Image: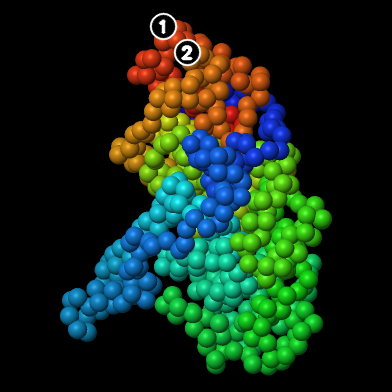
């Protein structure tokens, strides 16, 4: 891969400034605490939003997060293309030649390809609308929880192959994001995308399919070790006949097993709703969900006592999510030093948060494609467990790509620079592209095919990114914003810039090196410290290059 100047600068910056991440300040309701809350409960905040949160106080800020909005009125999703409607269109087009005329193979292929394109465009439009809401900060906690549930109740477009059903699932998750977990589990068990993804549409009396029942217990409600194989088999019988038709739930009585079943020691003629209640009322459910929520929002695995406390909070709230999150965000332990700057930002957190802090307004599609390339492809989770998160987000390649995408947001790396190699070269059927070394086990055939599919999707995303460059240039005024912050000399400019674009504090050594970098660039431009911000047309490119370096640092990858 050939790297141009902007990419080389990022690589050198990573080597130059790599250093331990420093803890944030002591536990008080200040700008650092407000930043921590907005990073975890939303997708970052602008300096003005942080200032407002500090002035309003903790309780008012948490109340606003919990109650700032309701289910959104979507602007253009009232006539979604459904699978059944697509099939009807194929029938109509296929008989254009006249009654009794068999459609040609070419016509069938043309119609299928057209429907596939429309299906892809439909999902893309919806996902860019979702990212647009993240960037705008509209109802940020609801969108954060929608993303959490999207990784908890996973379904994949690769298997469902129906954008209408994937969009409807996202709508469901959003509508109940802060509501009753019990209600949400009952609803997801009837969700057509979930029924198809976990094969429950094939679950029938006499030949039960156990996929949904197993994941319902292991991934959705109980966790490993809290159920047995007999429980899975019995629960699968309870969900026989739960299917879908044209994007709607259908209960097929002729396929349902009405016999007696026993799940977790509870016996009777249980159906799917009965099983869900048995699971949620079991001792294991509240600790399982509490641990997952705590790990997600705090960024570290919770200890047993913290899980016990929040499992109790879930039971007290009858599994309503909003009261539990309110308790968490008002809990002084949520702001303890050791969990601040302890979570690696996901690709969306990095891209959306950087856009918000910079005041940039990139096309949402650019952020969608960027997140895809960094490993967080919405509606395409890597497996039924969703995204692993944490350290899995960062590899040598993805760290370089994060810096490059930050450069794109700033206008410092053009998409031609970003694509200054042939992506086809990256498609390696041998398995070496997956990082295989001598002595490692070879890939399975299924694994190889899935990796090749991911590579092909990445290739398509790279090409779409290149096309976007022709229509978009970043618009921002870093020099004006930093001047308004009161910065006057190199050190105060670095402090103001880092305060705007980072979620965490810089270490003293890193800060000193950034001051030196700014001094060098300023002097090369023939400007004194006092002159820099008075000449914004000359200051802006220098400050954007500096911001590019800052967003490529290890500190920029955590929150």
**SS at mark 1 in the image:** loop
Single out the residue that lies furthest toward the left.
Answer: 98
**SS at mark 2 in the image:** helix
> Does the rendering let one see residue 451?
no
Give the labeled residue for mark 1: 526
Give the labeled residue for mark 2: 521
| Closer to the camera in the image, 532 or 48 | 48
Q: Using the image, determine if residue 290 lies above or below residue 21.
A: below
Q: CA distance from mark 1 to mark 2?
A: 9 Å
Q: Is residue 505 left or right of residue 423?
A: right
| Closer to the camera in the image, 533 or 208 | 533
On the image, the x and y values in percent for residue 547 come to: 49, 26
Quadrant of res 283: bottom right
Quadrant of res 271: bottom right
On the image, the x and y values in percent for residue 276 come to: 66, 77
Q: Using the image, determine if residue 108 lies above or below residue 62.
A: below
Is the residue marked by circle 1 packed among few (<14), some (14-19), or many (20+) residues within 10 Å? few
| Closer to the camera in the image, 471 or 373 | 471
Look at 76% across and 64% down and name the residue there. Answer: 312
Look at 72% across and 68% down and name the residue there. Answer: 316
| Closer to the camera in the image, 521 or 465 | 521
Q: Is residue 477 left or right of residue 207?
A: left
On the image, the x and y values in percent for residue 346 come to: 58, 45
């Amino acid at each position: 891969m050939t790297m141009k100047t902007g990419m080389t600068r990022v690589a050198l910056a990573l080597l130059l400034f790599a250093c331990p991440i420093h803890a944030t300040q002591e536990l008080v309701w200040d700008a650092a605490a407000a930043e921590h809350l907005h990073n975890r409960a939303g997708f970052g905040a602008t300096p003005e939003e942080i200032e407002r949160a500090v002035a309003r106080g903790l309780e008012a800020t948490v109340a606003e997060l919990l109650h700032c909005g309701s289910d959104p009125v979507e602007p253009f999703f009232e006539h979604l293309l459904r699978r059944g409607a697509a099939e009807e269109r194929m029938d109509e087009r296929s008989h254009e030649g006249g009654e009794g005329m068999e459609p040609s193979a070419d016509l069938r292929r043309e119609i299928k390809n057209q429907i596939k394109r429309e299906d892809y465009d439909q999902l893309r439009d919806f996902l860019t609308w979702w990212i647009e809401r993240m960037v705008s900060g509209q109802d940020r906690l609801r969108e954060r929880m929608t993303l959490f549930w999207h990784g908890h109740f996973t379904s994949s477009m690769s298997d469902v192959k129906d954008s209408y059903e994937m969009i409807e699932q996202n709508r469901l998750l959003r509508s109940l994001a802060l509501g009753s977990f019990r209600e949400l589990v009952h609803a997801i068990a009837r969700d057509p995308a979930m029924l198809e993804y976990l094969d429950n549409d094939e679950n029938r009396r006499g030949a039960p399919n156990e996929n949904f029942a197993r994941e319902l217990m292991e991934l959705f409600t109980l966790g490993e070790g809290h159920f047995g194989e007999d429980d899975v088999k019995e629960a699968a019988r309870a969900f026989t006949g739960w299917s879908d038709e044209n994007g709607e739930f259908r209960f097929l009585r002729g396929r349902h097993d009405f016999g007696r079943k026993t799940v977790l020691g509870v016996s009777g003629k249980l159906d799917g709703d009965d099983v869900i209640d048995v699971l949620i009322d079991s001792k294991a459910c509240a600790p399982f969900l509490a641990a997952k929520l705590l790990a997600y929002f705090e960024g570290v695995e919770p200890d047993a006592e913290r899980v016990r406390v929040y499992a109790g909070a879930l039971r007290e709230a009858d599994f309503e999510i909003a009261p539990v999150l309110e308790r968490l965000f008002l809990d002084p332990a949520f702001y303890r030093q050791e969990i601040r700057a302890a979570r690696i930002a996901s690709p969306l957190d990095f891209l959306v948060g950087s856009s918000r802090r910079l005041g940039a307004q990139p096309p949402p599609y650019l952020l969608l494609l960027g997140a895809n390339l960094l490993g967080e492809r919405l509606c395409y989770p890597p497996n039924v467990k969703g995204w692993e998160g944490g350290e899995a987000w960062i590899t040598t390649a993805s760290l370089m790509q994060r810096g490059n995408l930050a450069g794109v947001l700033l206008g410092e790396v053009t998409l031609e620079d970003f694509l200054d190699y042939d992506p086809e070269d990256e498609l390696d059927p041998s398995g070496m592209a997956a990082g295989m070394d001598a002595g490692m086990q070879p890939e399975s055939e299924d694994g190889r095919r899935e990796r090749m599919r991911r590579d092909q999707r990445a290739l398509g995303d790279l090409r779409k990114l290149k096309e976007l460059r022709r229509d978009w240039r970043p618009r921002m005024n870093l020099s004006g914003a930093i001047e308004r912050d009161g910065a006057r000399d190199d050190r105060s400019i670095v402090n103001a810039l880092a305060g705007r674009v980072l979620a965490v504090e810089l270490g003293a050594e890193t800060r000193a090196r950034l001051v030196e970098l700014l001094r060098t660039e300023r002097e090369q431009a023939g400007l004194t410290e006092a002159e820099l911000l008075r000449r914004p047309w000359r200051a802006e490119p220098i400050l954007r290059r500096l911001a590019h370096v800052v967003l490529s640092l290890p500190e920029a990858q955590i929150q």
